[in-house]
Structure formats: C-alpha cells, structure tokens
Image: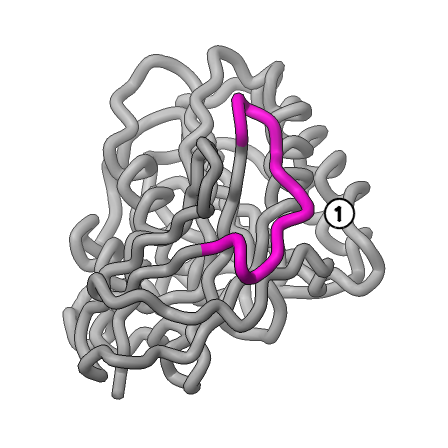
Amino acid sequence: MSRHFLGVFLTMAASTTVVAQAPSFSSRVEAVRVDVLVTENGRLVSGLAPGDFEVLDNGVPQKVDLASLEEIPLNVVLALDVSGSLNAQQIGHLQTAGSTLLDGLKQTDQAALLTFSHVVSQGSPLTSDFNRIRAALKETGTSGQTSLVDAAYAGMMIGESDVGRSLLIVFTDGVDTRSWLTADAVLETAKRCDVVVYGVDVGTRRASFSRELSAATGGRLVEIESTRDLNATFRGILDEFRQRYLISYSPEGVTPGGWHRLDVRVKARSVTVRARPGYLSSH
C-alpha cells in the first residue's frame, strides 16, 4: 500500500455509507467478547474468575463463560500526530517512545504505524517485522495541519484487519483541524469495532474527541504535560493492556439487533471497572 493511499481512502470514507458498513463488534458471533480493566486503589487486580464478574446486557444479567488474563497475541497500532506544531525535539521523543513500545512486544504480536498531519499515511501495515516499523519511525518529519479524526478511523480499521486483541494508541498535541470524516461518524464506528483505543494528548488543549473515543471503546485518555513523558506513557499503556481481562458470554434474554448497553461489575469488591459501554449487534 502506498504511503498516500490512506489519504485517498479517507476522502472516499467521508460518506456515511462507508461508516455504516464498518465491522460490527464481536456480537457477529454468538459470544460477546469484552476487554475489561479492573483496578483497586490504582492497582491492577488479578486472580478473578468468571464467577467474580457480573454482566448486564440491556439490564439483563448474563452468565460469564470466560474471564481470562491469558496473553492472546496483540495487534498494536500506533497513530502518531506529526503536524507542523511539533518541533524536532518532540518528534525525537515520539520516535523513541514508539521504539520502546516495540521493544515490549512479543514475537507473536503484530504492530502497525500510521502518521498524520493534513494527510494520513501508513508507515507500515500490521507486521511482526518490528525493524520495518522502527525504520518507518525514523523517517517521520513534521508538516501541515491535524487530521486526528481521520487517523483514528484508519487506525481502527487496521486494528480490525487481523485476528488478535487490538490496541490503538492515538497520540496528538492538538485538536482536529483538517479531517474529512466527522467526529460523530467515527465515534459511531467505534461502537461497531473490537479495538480498544488509548488516547495520548500532550499540552493543555481540549481533548474531547480523544476522551469520547477512548471511553466508547473501553480504553482511556492519558494526558501528559510534555513529550518527555511519552516513553513511560507508551510502555505503561502496553503493560496495562496486557493486564486486561478478556471476558465473554452468550447473550440470553435480550432482543437481538441494535445497540446493547453493557454494565460490567465485580461482585462484592470495591473496585474500578473499565469496559466499553455497549456493543452494536448486527443480528
């Protein structure tokens, strides 16, 4: 795929028809799969079994069949802002952070690289050849405006393109100034995807889109003061993602089709549970 193919693709994707055809969440099969982060006083909670979880699907209690911390191979997609507002030192921090994240991946994992300014470019598709991605990182330079919304959409589509648990990290230092797609359309797509998004925003600008996108997918927004913090931030996100439970259940007692509100809890414990707020069933 050429580096500028995604720019053409996203121009075409501006229509609502493309968004409506985005992949549905895991309800395409009988089992619904949800990535869940459980913390207690800021610490990750391990050792939970299926019976420790309570899941309500549109308010109806469900039987959890699986709750596993088993390390299924990951698809990690980096979507990195390289717009003209970043200076050479900040790009250097971003390149180092990306390389550090790759150091934390396993041979069974895959990664991909997107960069975005006024266009979205694919530095590398999903691959286990991490040296290819490191080489693409070294070539990044800055120019133009910020197509944050388009990049988020493209990143989710890449994450959905192969089997595995998919993590999308979207870094930006500002708000969207150039996208073809609307924020609402991409947030609607996020409801249909199986990708968990972590936003990383640097500086003091408002991050409403990054926050909404992260929440819609069960991820979270990380706000940092300086790009000097990116190295620890990227590695911390990867470590946290590996500690998320994968729970699944077969929906019973709920009407198929449409939007299903999800409420995931841990029984008899005062913990914080982070999971996607629902899924869109295609049945």
Q: How far across and how far down the image is residue 126, in percent?
A: 64, 65
Q: Quadrant of the N terminus?
A: bottom right
Give the labeled residue for mark 1. Answer: 135
Residue 143 in sight here: no
Residue 10 in sight here: yes
- Mark 1: give few (<14), some (14-19) or many (20+) Cα within 10 Å: few
Determine the residue positioned at 61% across, 34% down.
Answer: 44
Image: 66 above or below 231: below
Determine the residue positioned at 64% across, 23% down.
Answer: 93
Q: How far across and how far down the image is residue 16, in percent?
A: 15, 70
For the residue marked with disc 1, what is the amino acid?
Ala
User: Is residue 161 left or right of 46 when viewed as pictured?
Assistant: left
Circle 1: element type: helix
Count of all numbered marks drawn on residues in the image: 1
Q: How far across and how far down the image is residue 279, in percent?
A: 30, 66
Image: 30 above or below 200: below
Q: Nearer the viewer, residue 36 or 65?
A: 65
Q: How far across and how far down the image is residue 136, in percent?
A: 68, 48
Q: Is residue 51 magenta?
A: yes
Q: Is residue 133 magenta?
A: no
Determine the residue positioned at 53% across, 60% down.
Answer: 51
Q: Nearer the viewer, residue 57 or 223?
A: 57
Q: Nearer the viewer, residue 50 or 142?
A: 50
Region in magenta: 40-53
Q: Quadrant of the C terminus?
A: bottom left
Dividing the picture into quadrants, the one containing residue 256 is bottom left
Q: Nearer the viewer, residue 113 or 25?
A: 25
User: Is residue 47 left or right of 169 when viewed as pictured?
Assistant: right
* Residue situated furthest front in the rendering: 268
Image: 78 above or below 59: above
Q: Which scheme is used to colour this image of the protein? A: one colour
